[in-house]
Amino acid sequence: MSSPPPFCVVVLAAGQGTRMRSDTHKVLHPIAGKPMLLHLLDTVQGMGAAKVVVVLGKGREQVEEAIALRDGVTTAIQSEQKGTGHAVRVAEKSLSGFDGPVIVTFGDTPFVTAETMNAMLERLLASDDPGVVVLASSPDDGKAYGRVILEDGGDRIAKMVEYKDATEEQRAVRLCNSGMLAARAPDLFGWLGKISNANAAGEYYLPDVVNVAHDEGRHPVAIEGEPFETAGVNSRAELAALELDWQRRRRWEALEQGATLIDPESVWFSADTQLGRDCTIEPHVVFGPGVKIADGAVIRAFSHIEGATIATGCEVGPFARLRPGAVMERGSKVGNFVEMKKTVLGEGAKANHLTYLGDSEVGAKANIGAGTITCNYDGFFKYPTKIGAGAFIGSNSALVAPVTIGAGAIVGAGSVVTKDVEADELAVARGEQRGMKGWASRFRERQKKKKGTA
């Protein structure tokens, strides 16, 4: 389906997430630096969902704050936890007057793809008019998931059975229920009104709509997605496992797109990391959010990069840290144990060793010596440092902002610069060196006598 019909999405996110043992709402725990719920919302909103209803319960204030600025996303409150079927019914008022398809998803199952959801919609609107489309998958370990039993030779569901109620033969079936489904809004909410809570937990289960639809002659069907798409998170261990799965997929995607990863398993990406062709990433590099790397750049081992833009031909690290607002222009270089924050390093400029550049502008081909520090903070406010093109900053210099070093200027090693330096000027700001002949040997003799070792 090239473009889906008008549809809405209900995202269930009212679970308390007690197994996470966290003050953070479960659906806000990040994978690849982005909360799980936002992964899912980006997907469904990118598909063009007419409306997204997020069903919340305990801890809803955190989620409401996280999604407050998203157009087309609203919330519904499940004040009492009466099961997944009840949670979807809570969203009914928010979808009043809508009679098109509704996809029900889960905020802790973040990676169902647009392609799979489009396939669910296409199957729902097929000429044989199924009542419900269930998303299933065949994981290597079905664990205690409910099983989907299909009729022979097709995608029609003969029966869905919870694991605890399944026979050994049924448990041997690999097709598992993800919990996600699609149905037309009038059908969905009509059937939800007919399901029973006559079970041990006294809850209304969403999968029961499949049985109701079947009993009314509206055959339910299943489509199969990848296990990765249907993997949910209920514990820290499951969060870590899904993070690892996502990272492995992203690493191979980077390789297929033309990047070189020397040791793929040691590189960690964020959801929005952008890599150019022919860039090289050495082992143990971590990308935080907001990183853009152009073609041909080299990121050496053990570097941590976040919120930075790195141009063609740049070199970073090893052991470098680029923080938000760091911009490296074409051919510039940052070496070992260099940190940059809110700084532009001009074309061909270099900061090779042991340097901190914060709130700075460094001109083209400037050379920043080892141990240089821009002193940008006085405990209350931040101040800028400007270093002109071709300037040379000697090792172990402190540039006390606000200060400007002119183009082509030289700052002598060990200087503390508190005033502007003009273009092509030499600035030396350090105490005068004195020599006292014989002082060292006389000092040692005195100390030996005090210690009684003379």
Image: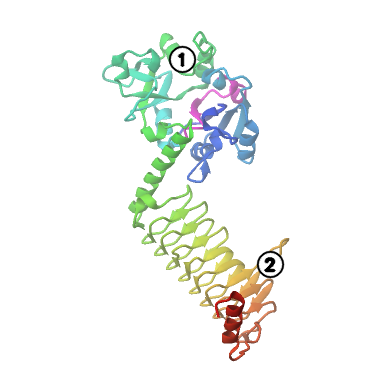
What residue occupies the far right of the structure in this picture? 380
- The first of marks 2 and 1 along the sequence is 1
What residue occupies the far left of the structure in this picture? 153
Magenta stretch in the rendered image: 89-110
- Image spot of residue 391 (x, y percent): 56, 80
Residue 389, quarter of picture: bottom right
Q: Which residue is mark 2?
A: 383
Count neighbours of disc 2 (C-alpha within 10 A) and say few if under 14, some if 14 to 19, many if 20 or more.
Answer: some
Q: Is residue 11 visible?
A: no
Q: Is residue 157 visible?
A: yes
| Amino acid type indicated by mark 1 | Asp
In the rendered structure, find residue 425 and report the number of the disc placed on it. none
Vertical position of residue 447 compared to residue 64: above or below:
below
Classify the position of the N terminus by image quarter.
top left
- Image spot of residue 161 (x, y percent): 38, 15
**Helix, strand or loop under label 2:** loop
Q: Decide whether residue 101 is among the magenta residues.
A: yes
Residue drawn at point x = 41 percent, y = 42 percent? 244
Snapshot colouring: rainbow
In the rendered structure, find residue 208 and report the number of the disc placed on it. 1
- Image spot of residue 150 (x, y percent): 32, 18
